[in-house]
């Protein structure tokens, strides 16, 4: 049973200590949690600026930093809310104006502005596919949204985007039965790596083995299963649920990741791409956009292979990861040397995210 849901990340050690023996053992199989205090002595000349920027001098002179590492995947994060108040250079953006006055948009007329795959295009109600002109892999397509503005999506549109990507995957797999490793991904706005403002997702279907990050996760989950005789993904959910950072709705597990890639990472787990999973994707994006003010994000859907493989995928669910990529009006990048070569540094609170998701989904 989940503990109180109104805690913050700085209280996580107390929350773990309050768990029952079985719950705590499960949590500590997956996560290593510790804290430290960062201290500093500012000069008097800095004090007015510190108060203006951070609210008080005391907030900076002793800072509690939480370190969480996923023992299975070795994804690690350092939480310090003060990082969100760092000075940033920003410029105002108007997406409608950017769409109207920006560079030529090849996606505005995809039938003439984009190539098609050898098996043709897949047309949905709210989108159409194209073949990517500069490919990641042999099968690499686009799902081009009819709605140019990437943040103007409805539940029905989101369902159609995912379904159209899946139909593209069916055709790619039928064209080459050895192409069986599928990913759907959506980079929203330039902070996320999108080169075009016009709303679009990407779909890829690989051969030989799954993409490296997915294959690594499969291998680590298999080792966990062999060592502990429990399914990693189920334990991952239960560990989050035990501290109030996860819940289930209509068969889809919703997790505010305690070891996120960056701010506000959500994990969604389901047996396959169900209607419930698509609803939870929509509700997560709606919550981020309308409640948390997130406008740039990365979304990926991992699925197990689409036909038999030499390696075992038993117990591996359909998995969605969605992460906030920061304010598009900020010139400062959200990923630096720490994220690339050490551990993620995050200012958002997974427990605040979990509460927002729970309220948005009325779960």
Image (tube, helix red, strand yellow):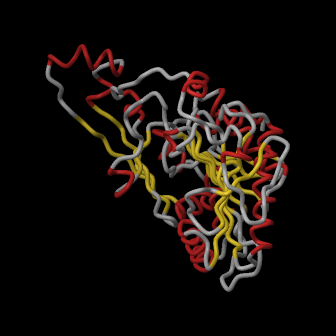
Where 352 sits versus 43, above or below?
Answer: below
Residue drawn at x 72%, y 75% as measured from the top left: 314
Instruction: Give the percent coordinates (x, y) of residue 99.
Output: 60, 28
Which sits in the foreground, 102 or 342? 102
Left or right, 69 with respect to 104, comes to left
Q: Quadrant of residue 236?
A: bottom right
Where 208 sits versus 205, above or below?
Answer: below
Residue drawn at x 74%, y 52% as measured from the top left: 129
Give the number of callouts: 0
Q: Residue furthest front?
A: 112
Instruction: Give the percent coordinates (x, y) of residue 296.
Output: 56, 37
Which sits in the foreground, 81 or 86? 86
Q: Answer whether residue 242 is visible to the viewer in this image.
A: no
Instruction: Give the percent coordinates (x, y) of residue 42.
Output: 18, 26
Q: Residue furthest bottom?
A: 310
Residue drawn at x 71%, y 40% as measured from the top left: 109
Instruction: Give the percent coordinates (x, y) of residue 95.
Output: 58, 26
Q: Quadrant of residue 291?
A: top right
Where 135 sits versus 5, above or below?
Answer: below
Which sits in the foreground, 21 or 278? 278
Left or right, 85 with respect to 139, comes to left
Which sits in the foreground, 74 or 141? 141
Quadrant showing the C terminus: top right
Q: Answer whether residue 314 is visible to the viewer in this image.
A: yes
Residue drawn at x 72%, y 62% as measured from the top left: 117
């Amino acid at each position: 049973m989940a503990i109180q849901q109104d805690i913050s990340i700085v209280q996580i050690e107390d929350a773990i200590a309050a768990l029952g023996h079985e719950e705590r053992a499960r949590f500590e199989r997956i996560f290593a949690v510790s804290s430290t205090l960062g201290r500093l002595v500012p000069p008097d000349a800095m004090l007015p600026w510190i108060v203006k920027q951070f609210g008080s001098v005391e907030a900076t002179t002793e800072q509690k930093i939480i370190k969480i590492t996923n023992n299975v995947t070795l994804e690690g994060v350092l939480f310090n809310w003060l990082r969100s108040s760092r000075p940033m250079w920003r410029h105002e953006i108007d997406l409608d104006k950017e769409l109207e006055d920006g560079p030529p948009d090849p996606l505005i007329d995809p039938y003439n502005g984009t190539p098609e795959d050898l098996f043709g295009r897949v047309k949905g109600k709210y989108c159409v596919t194209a073949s990517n002109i500069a490919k990641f892999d042999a099968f690499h397509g686009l799902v081009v949204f009819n709605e140019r503005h990437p943040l103007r999506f409805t539940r029905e549109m989101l369902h159609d985007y995912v379904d159209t990507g899946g139909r593209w995957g069916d055709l790619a797999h039928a064209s080459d039965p050895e192409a069986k490793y599928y990913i759907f991904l959506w980079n929203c706005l330039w902070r996320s790596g999108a080169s075009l403002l016009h709303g679009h997702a990407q779909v890829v279907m690989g051969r030989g083995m799954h993409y490296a990050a997915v294959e690594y996760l499969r291998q680590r989950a298999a080792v966990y299963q062999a060592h502990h005789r429990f399914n990693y993904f189920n334990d991952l959910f239960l560990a989050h649920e035990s501290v109030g950072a996860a819940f289930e709705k209509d068969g889809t597990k919703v997790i505010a990741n305690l070891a996120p890639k960056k701010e506000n990472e959500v994990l969604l787990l389901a047996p396959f791409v169900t209607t419930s999973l698509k609803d939870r994707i929509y509700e997560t994006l709606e919550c981020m956009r309308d409640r948390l003010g997130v406008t740039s994000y990365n979304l990926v859907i991992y699925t197990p292979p689409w036909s038999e493989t030499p390696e075992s995928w038993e117990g591996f669910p359909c998995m969605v990861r969605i992460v906030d990529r920061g304010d598009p009006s900020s010139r400062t990048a959200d990923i630096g040397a720490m994220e690339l070569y050490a551990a993620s540094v995050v200012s958002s609170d997974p427990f605040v995210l979990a509460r927002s998701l729970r309220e948005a989904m009325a779960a």
